[in-house]
Amino acid sequence: MKAFIVSQDKPDVTKRFLHIKNMKWSYFLFLLPALLFYLVFFFYPVLLGFFYSFTNWDGIAKSYKVIGLKNYASILQDMRFLQAIKFTFTYALMYVILKLTLALIIALLLNGNMKLRGFFRSVYFFPAVLSLITVSLVFNQLFYAVIPRIGEGLGLEWLSQNLLSQKETAVFGIIIANLWHGFSVPMVIFLAGLASVPKDLHEAATIDGASPFQRFISITVPFLIPMLNVNLVISIKGALTVFESIMAMTGGGPASATESVGYLIYQHGINDFKFAYATAESICIFVIVAVISVIQIKVLNRKEAGQQ
């Protein structure tokens, strides 16, 4: 009787194994088109660009020479690139701090009990659906024609000047435009994180006499660390590769004061026909972004709720 039961179970186990195996192949076939697109249009161009960074190709000629690390050695001595790095890091530091602070403050306000909460969430998310080029062109006209006239009408000299026309203030004009466009997505991510914070912990802390600030630091912040990680990676990458707004608003000016690494790569690759050199610059900024992202993820993961 036992032998009969075993002999009856074996076909069922075999069928189940074959069914699972067929399902795995089905999943792979559904994934295959996306995987092929990723390999052809992303992975292969990255590898090809990495190879070209060791050549002297101008982007047009059919022939080129392999020159090894010469491009990378030249980058380290290129004062224009070093100046662009300095501006990019200065811009990134101010932009990331202001962007995430603004996004968190608005997320905290929209997470509370308020009338028309859904309406205000839609309003604050609206800038994210617009093109950054469009936003930059609009702010360019605001700084050029609208705000200076308002300043003249109010008799305020500091407001009557175009921010983008001064070397000392041009970066602030770019930051303002990018802040208005860029804070919406991290705001939504923070809202998702705030929804995951247990309310009973806040209630218990309130009963124990904790102030709102103490509850925010001790309870809310640890639960927001994963969202902060995501926002930091996205924001740092976007800040260190800023290009569109500078292209539309200042063109790297005045006097190259707002020339970022992204804009410099464009100038070298497209206008100066130094494609291999520009590719080497892009590899450098890729390594910088990767190193910074890995470090900040490891540091913040230690502060996440439930982690020691």
Image (cartoon, grey):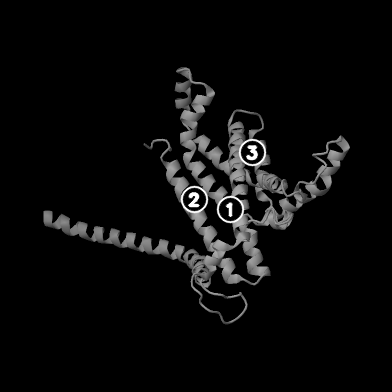
Q: Residue at x 58, y 43 (%)?
A: 186
Instruction: Describe the element under mark 3 as helix, strand or loop.
Output: helix
Cβ–Cβ under 8 Å for marks 2 and 3: no
Residue at coordinates 51% horizontally, 41% vertically from top-left? 228
Identify the amino acid type marked 3.
Arg
Q: Which tag, 1 or 3, sits closer to the chain's start?
A: 3
Q: Quadrant of the C terminus?
A: top left
Q: CA distance from mark 1 to mark 2?
A: 11 Å
Q: Around disc 3, counting alpha carbons within 10 Å, would you say few (fewer than 14), some (14 to 19), or many (20 or more)?
A: some
Circle 1 SS class: helix
In this view, the mark in front (2 or 3): 2
Q: Look at the picture and state if 39 lies above or below 183.
A: below
Label for residue 240? 1
Q: Residue at x 52, y 35 (%)?
A: 194
Q: Are marks 1 and 2 in contact (CB under 8 Å)?
A: yes
Quadrant of the rendering where the N terminus is positioned = bottom left
> Does any portion of residue 272 appear in the rendered image?
yes
Give x and y (percent) for residue 301: 42, 42
In front of the other: 127 or 27: 127
Report the front residue among 103 and 249: 249
Closer to the observer: label 1 or label 3? 1
Q: Indicate the amino acid at tag 1.
A: Leu
Residue 262: image location, x then y, percent: 62, 59
Dot 1 surroundings within 10 Å: few (below 14), some, or many (20 or more)? many
How far apart are the alpha carbons under marks 2 and 3?
31 Å
- For disc 3, the marked residue is 121
Q: Earlier in the sequence, mark 2 or mark 3?
A: 3
Label annotation for residue 292: 2
N-terminal label among 1 and 2: 1
Secondary structure type for disc 2: helix
**Callout 2, which amino acid?**
Ile
Label 2 neighbourhood size at 10 Å, few (<14), some (14-19), many (20+)? some
